[in-house]
C-alpha cells in the first residue's frame, strides 16, 4: 500500500494576511488540542476567535477571488468552532463550581 502524504491547501492572499494569521491559528489550534478539559481549552479558543476575526475583517476582501472566498469560509468555520469550545469551557466551569458548592454544603 502506498502511504499518502497530507497536502495543505494553499490560499494565495494578495496582501499576505492569510499566511501570517494561519501560523498563529495553527499554533492556537495545537494548544486547544493539547488541553485536556474544556475549561482549559477556552482561553486558547478565545485567542483563536480573535485571530480568525482579523481575517474576517479583511478590508481587501474580493468576492470574485476564489482565494478570498476560501479564506472567508475557512475563517467562518474556525470562528464557529472557537465559539463552541468557548461555550463548552463556560459550561465546564459552571459544572465544576456547582460540584464544588455541593461538596462544601
Image (tube, rainbow, N blue to C red):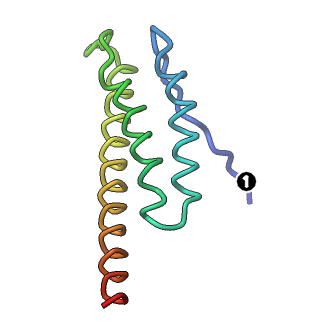
The residue lying toward the viewer, choosing from 15 and 33, is 33
Residue closest to the eye, 61 or 51: 51
| Residue located 42% across and 31% down the image | 51
- Locate residue 20, reporting x and y percent: 54, 21
**Relative image position of residue 43 (x, y in whole percent):** 44, 49
Residue for badge 1: 3
The quadrant of the picture occupied by the C terminus is bottom left
Front residue of 28 and 94? 94
Q: Where is 33 relative to 8, above or below?
A: below
Residue 63 located left or right of residue 81:
left
Q: Position of residue 23 (x, y in %)?
A: 57, 30
Q: Is residue 95 left or right of residue 17?
A: left
Report x, y in % for residue 14: 45, 9
| Mark 1 neighbour class, 10 Å CA radius: few under 14, some 14 to 19, many 20 or more | few
Residue 83 to residue 63: above or below: below
Image quadrant where one finds the N terminus = bottom right
Residue at 33% across, 42% down: 77
User: How many numbered badges does the structure rendering display?
Assistant: 1
Disc 1 secondary structure class: loop
- Residue at coordinates 33% horizontally, 16% vertically from top-left? 58
Residue 72 to residue 1: above or below: above
Q: Residue furthest front?
A: 105
* Residue 23 versus residue 68 in the image, above or below: below
Q: Residue at x 53, y 43 (%)?
A: 28
Residue 38: image quadrant is bottom left
State the residue in front, 50 or 73.
50
Amino acid at each position: 500500500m502506498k502511504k499518502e502524504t497530507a497536502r495543505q491547501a494553499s490560499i494565495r492572499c494578495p496582501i499576505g494576511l492569510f499566511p501570517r494569521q494561519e501560523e498563529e491559528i495553527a499554533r492556537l489550534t495545537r494548544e486547544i488540542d493539547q488541553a485536556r478539559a474544556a475549561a482549559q481549552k477556552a482561553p486558547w479558543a478565545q485567542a483563536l476567535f480573535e485571530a480568525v476575526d482579523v481575517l474576517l475583517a479583511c478590508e481587501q476582501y474580493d468576492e470574485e477571488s476564489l482565494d478570498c472566498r476560501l479564506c472567508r469560509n475557512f475563517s467562518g468555520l474556525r470562528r464557529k468552532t472557537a465559539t463552541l469550545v468557548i461555550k463548552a469551557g463556560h459550561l465546564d466551569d459552571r459544572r465544576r463550581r456547582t460540584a464544588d458548592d455541593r461538596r462544601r454544603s
